[in-house]
Image: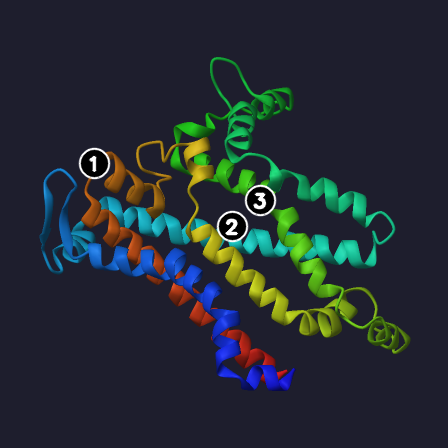
Amino acid sequence: MRSVFDDRKTIVILLGPALLVYTAVKLVPVFWTGGLSFFDGNLVRGFQFTGLDNVKRFIEDPVALDATWFTVRIAILLTIGQVILGYGLAILYTFSLRRSSALIRTIVFFPIVLPTVAVGLLFTRFFQFAPEYGVVDTALEAAGAEPVDWFATGTGSVVVLVIMELWRTMGFYAVLLYAGLMDIPEELLESARLDGANGLRLVRHIVVPLSLPVLLSTVIFSFNATLKIFDSVVALTNGGPGTDTTPLTLHMFRTAFSYSEYGYGATLATVLTLMCFLVTIVIFNSSRRDITQG
């Protein structure tokens, strides 16, 4: 095996096709989009080099800045919710529901395989206000509370969006974290229990430190995924009311494909790519520091 990895020709033959596909599918579109952000125009009018004009336009565009701020807020909210709920479910699978965890994992994981449009329509029905109350407003009215027009305000729309996304994705992150918890040696847990560590003390002093690498990987995965949220917003609110729930991805899509401003759309895509890249670097460096200290 060592002689194989010492042979450069063999390494090129083994890795070359995969690297070519990765370069064609991943790297070329990224650099192409970055280059397009220095131009203005479309396929009909042609493209003119404009330098940094699109960057200046982004800084002065209130809709783009609002979309960026909304993207950051929704990413933070969803990441916190997904990781906390997923980690809690993973701990329940491991320590309390071991015998029936396969059935429960399947039930909780099921929403992630549903089409996002179907889930969006389902939650629109649950939270609808007119022409008749949905399930949620009917329950509020039965409890003596005032029904709420959830989709009439930005705050109400964000609440429904967060609930829907957490319900749809928490099973996926629970299974991901459960795989990390399964790597903790059972002998170590038994030893800690014999030393008197049970319940929260066991989780705090043994489980969390040993599962920190997969936990931080999950944070990176969740934050990057929620920064690129698109289909859930389109299916549930289409960015409304107004532009209150418009993320950067939806603003980029409308700019590029509805208004045919490919250069400015490419600038928005480049900004989003840089945000994902910076978040990954920051969290990855934090994880390396924590592991070393541990």
Name the residue nearer the viewer: 53 or 29: 29
The image quadrant of residue 207 is bottom right
Dot 1 amino acid type? Tyr
Dot 3 amino acid type? Leu
Label 2: which secondary element? helix
Q: Name the residue under label 2.
A: 78
Mark 1–mark 3 Cα distance, whole angstroms, equals: 32 Å
Disc with the residue nearer the chain's start (3 vs 2) = 2
Q: Name the residue under label 3.
A: 166
| Quadrant placement of the C terminus | bottom right
Residue 143: horizontal and vertical position, in percent?
64, 24
Residue contact between numbered discs 3 and 2, judged by CB atoms under 8 Å:
yes
Question: Who's the residue at 51% across and 77% down the image?
Answer: 11
Left or right? Give the position of 204 relative to 274.
right
Label 1: which secondary element? loop
Name the residue nearer the viewer: 152 or 216: 216
Dot 2, crowdedness within 10 Å: few (<14), some or many (≥20)? Answer: many
Name the residue nearer the viewer: 37 or 67: 37
Question: Who's the residue at 37% across and 48% down the image?
Answer: 70
Question: Who's the residue at 27% across and 51% down the image?
Answer: 268
